[in-house]
Amino acid sequence: MINYLLSNAFRTVTLSQTSVKIYESCSSLVLFCDSLHDKNISAFLSNEAEGLSTRFERLSFPDLVWSTISLNNHSLHTYPLGDIIERSVKQTVGSLFLNSPSISSTNIENRSDSDQFIREVYRVSDSVDTPSLLKEFLSNIFFNQCIVVLRSKSGRNTDFGYSYQYKNGNLVSLEEQLALRQGLLGKCKEMATALVPHIVRSFRKRVYTSKTRTVSEGLTSVLPFIQWNPTMNSSPGSKPHINILVGTKSRAILSLNYELDSAVQRIILDGIHKNVSFNLSDIESFVGHPLHSLTKDFLEIAFVVYISDLYVSRKSDYSRNLDILIPVRHPDIWERSGSKLENAISFLARDSVSLRFTAKNERRDDITSFNTSEESKCCCLFSGGVDSAAGVLWAINHGLSPTLISYASGNLSGIQSTLANQIERKTSYHPPHLKVSWQAARRRSGSYRLGERPNSMLYQHLRSFFYLAIAYAVALESSISSVYIFENGPIALNPLLSESHINTRTVHPRFLEYFQSAMQAVFETNISIENPFIYRTKSQLTSYIKNKRLANDIIPYTSSCFAYARVKTLAQKLDDYDYQGTHDGDCLPCIIRRISLIAGHIPAQCDEHLIDIFDIFESPSFLRLPNRSLDSLVTIADLLRFSECLLRMSVNEIQYNFPDLYVYSRNLDCARISNTYQRYAMETINSFRQQSSTRLSGILEPILSHEVNL
Ligand SMILES: [Zn+2]
């Protein structure tokens, strides 16, 4: 079984790229281990200090180590394998503390003192030698690869995928899954033990290619059954590679300095050949004056990044290069700060990103400092969901005058306007509201036509970059000192409930930090970007609205559905031609919304859904769309298993099993994150216990009724 899983897991990557990534990550871990043995962790973390001031805390320590490694080696976190390596590094660092009673008993309410924690790190690392650390890391890599295949959608129809989730028509219990995982982990450890000597040998080689070749030889001898992807990576040329080109400059001229990709995508922002319509003039009329030339540059860069996300397809291993060449009015400033911007973009989508700038022949304004004196005003990202509605009320309640910024497409635009009107009616505050959208020009042919959008399951990872850029630009141009993005903690951190291929990081605290750092470098202002709801669950937000006696006036006008645009079509498929709602009811955001309504004791008339997940077997979707219902059931089961683990495991075990839960970020308090998740887990389990139909309860019973014991 393990051979089957590993063959499938590594099927899409080449042996050479795997060897390079394994070699690089192992070398970084050796440096980490050496710094522990030398009792000089600060030397290892020195580069991290540049962007993130170092503060040691037990729970965020693995992420601090990982962020140091990934900042020093940008290609490690990108696809392919980037997500697996990240997870495995954090688990490896977390494993140092798994059996450390003094740390596992640390009261998570109190942040441990930095110095005391570091002494504890040195103490536990005394008993760890480098080969055992590497063995732990490699077995985590193999294990995480196996588990992704085991529970991936493509695996559902195989025996392995099926037995992981269902058996004899019932959901597999958590205990059974854990036993399966322990068995797999044991086998992965055996393989890792055999690979470690090859890795150690690679360190002794002098030439880089010999080092990675030694790792390759190790991989083929330990995993002889893997059929690696034979595709050769194109060797880097001497000129910079470009696959997104902005403007109409001829290929012949550009080819003198750049290596243009055969599938280069051309984006034309202005002039008669324009192939996208995104009008800076809409933003100018909103702020009431012409935009500064540096702001114009920024908005065009952000828009091009977003269009690139939509139009550049990924390879079968999910990897993608976004090598963008864009003319700007202030190339010197962008060249100076471009790497920080690349960092923020690359973090969001795990893409390899490079931004190159040429001079745009347009008027340049003088660079003077941007005024941020309007401290009573703020820009709020306004998506039309419950969180953003609660956020606007929160801002008004804090004496702020919020300006709403929406990225609107299709019928979401109507939802946002109606909700903004409701807020205005109920608070007597008239919020300025900017709605931005874009369209591809209706050009059917010709050399400047925008290509076809690839059909991908990984899509719109970079939308929030564009969305936040608009809010930031409005703040800059309106002297506003703060930008708020409202998202409850569990969605903002968005940890994997269980292993699968993707998790987006739209409002991730680290992304917000990288974004802000890039903006400070470019605009030299201190406009803050904050998510005030990072320690709140969604039900606390619905309660917040209810406590203002606005539940009936606000909540029915919000929409949280992931698939809001397809709800009507789905309703018709289920013969519900009169359905007027905007929630399908069974996507993860809809499930979390319903939990928040139940846990927040929100009146039933605020609840609206096409499919009732608490009574899924009675829903027409169960008969008509059995696969969809099966997916919903898996989502529910994953959510409940995740919640059970949070309530029953020790902090060390939680961190080890859900390594992306605890993030190292300025001002982020992991103890408060723990409390938020405990509350979230209780709300989730209680909602399902109270609301589930008898049949659903019966199916969920194996997940809910047993103690978790690792
Ligand atoms: Zn939905």
Image: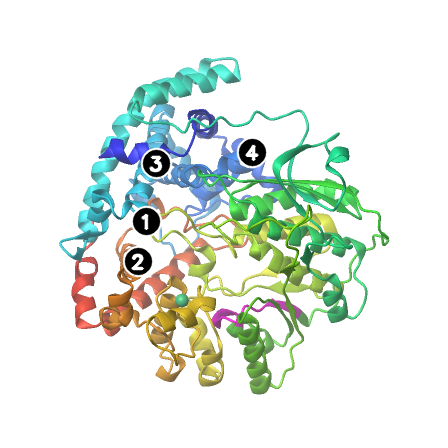
> Which three-letter amino acid code belongs to the residue tagged 4?
Asn
Q: Are marks 3 and 4 in contact (CB under 8 Å)?
A: no
Q: Residue at x 44, y 17 (%)?
A: 213
* Label located before the other in sequence (3 or 2): 3
> Which three-letter amino acid code belongs to the residue tagged 3?
Ala
Disc 3 secondary structure class:
helix
Can you say whether 444 is above or below 39 in the image? below
> Which three-letter amino acid code belongs to the residue tagged 2?
Asp
Residue 631's tag is: 2
Q: Are marks 1 and 2 in contact (CB under 8 Å)?
A: yes
Left or right side of 650 for 395: right
Q: Which residue is mark 1?
A: 153
* Label located before the other in sequence (3 or 1): 3
Disc 1 secondary structure class:
helix
* Label located before the other in sequence (1 or 2): 1
How far, Cα to Cα, is label 3 from label 4? 27 Å
Q: Mark 4 or mark 1, which is nearer to you?
A: 1
Q: Mark 4 or mark 2, which is nearer to you?
A: 2
Q: Which residue is mark 3?
A: 9
Disc 4 secondary structure class:
helix
> Which three-letter amino acid code belongs to the residue tagged 1?
Lys
Q: Are marks 3 and 2 in contact (CB under 8 Å)?
A: no
Assess disc 4: are there few (<14), some (14-19) or many (≥20) residues with their C-alpha within 10 Å of its C-alpha: few
Q: Nearer the viewer, residue 691 or 304?
A: 304
The picture quadrant for ligand 1 comes to: bottom left
Assess disc 2: are there few (<14), some (14-19) or many (≥20) residues with their C-alpha within 10 Å of its C-alpha: some
The color scheme shown is rainbow
Q: Position of residue 519 (x, y in %)?
A: 68, 52
Q: Position of residue 426 (x, y in %)?
A: 56, 86
Can you say whether 484 is above or below 572 in the image? above
Q: Nearer the viewer, residue 299 or 610?
A: 610
Q: Position of residue 435 (x, y in %)?
A: 64, 69
